[in-house]
Image (cartoon, rainbow, N blue to C red):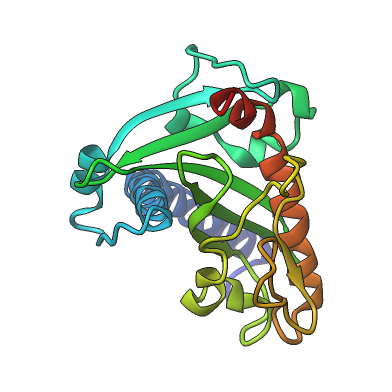
Amino acid sequence: MHSNKYIFIYSSVMVIVVAVALTVVAVQLKPAQENNIRIERMQNILAAANIPSTVKDAETLYKKYVTKDLVVNSKGDVNTAIKAFEVNLEIENKLPAEKRALSIFICTLDNGEKKYVVPIRGKGLWGPVWGYIAFKPDFNTITGSIFDHKGETPGLGAEINTSTFQAQFKGKQIFDETGNYVSVKTIKGGAQKDDLHGVDAISGGTLTSDGVNNMLHDGLSLYVEYFKKQTK
């Protein structure tokens, strides 16, 4: 029968071996995981601009259609020292609004039409929610949107990543007829058909809908000064 000392040493060695093995595996997998995140982001940007892609062709299509990207601040000034694709919204959202870096991705379609895609991020019921919103060159009318989440409730808040929910945003506007910023809101009970600033909220997903509203309003508001400069 083994002594307590032997059992302790054996257990300690096994813990160390397992920990080292897990660390090695994590290090080996990290580049692949980072590449998957990069490709997924490319797909989301393209999807917001209504350009379908797959994991295999996303990078090729991104290089073809994303003809320019830039970073601006909340005053609408361009920052050439930062690359748009490297901006991490999770980190930026922890900074004061005036210090955040804001990415803009310009997609040029085969017919010459341009779409301006901006990323946004907020909080849902159970975790972060995020999205990409594409605008016409009027910097007001939405042409496409993509939303996703980390842990919203299946069948309820998780519905934000469905095509049915996302399609509602096409044609909506973030400025009213007098040029005031109003964003786009999800409306409990359903939006009126002629409401340019409202979409149907998710049935049973009130808190997630509220999170999306806050994300849209706060996230897009940071781009207002840049948008206004482009339309003067």
Left or right, residue 213 beside residue 80: right
In the rendering, at what x and y percent does residue 134 appear? 48, 49
Nearest the viewer among 89 and 33 is: 89
Q: Is residue 168 above or below residue 110?
A: below
Q: How many marks?
A: 0
Residue drawn at 23 percent across, 38 percent down: 63
Nearest the viewer among 60 and 197 is: 197
Q: Is residue 70 above or below residue 134?
A: above
If the image is split into quadrants, where does the N terminus sit? bottom right
Left or right, residue 55 beside residue 101: left
If the image is split into quadrants, where does the C terminus sit? top right
Quarter of the image for residue 93 reads: top right
In the rendering, at what x and y percent does residue 22 appear? 45, 54
In the rendering, at what x and y percent does residue 227 appear? 60, 31
Quarter of the image for residue 211 reads: bottom right
Residue drawn at 64 percent across, 42 percent down: 90
In the rendering, at what x and y percent does residue 4 appear? 68, 65
Quarter of the image for residue 30 reads: top left
Left or right, residue 215 beside residue 2: right
Left or right, residue 137 beside residue 110: right
Residue drawn at 75 percent across, 42 percent down: 178
Residue drawn at 55 percent across, 40 percent down: 139
Q: Judge whether residue 228 can be spotted in this image.
A: yes
Residue lying farthest to the top in this orientation: 81
Q: Judge whether residue 126 can be spotted in this image.
A: no
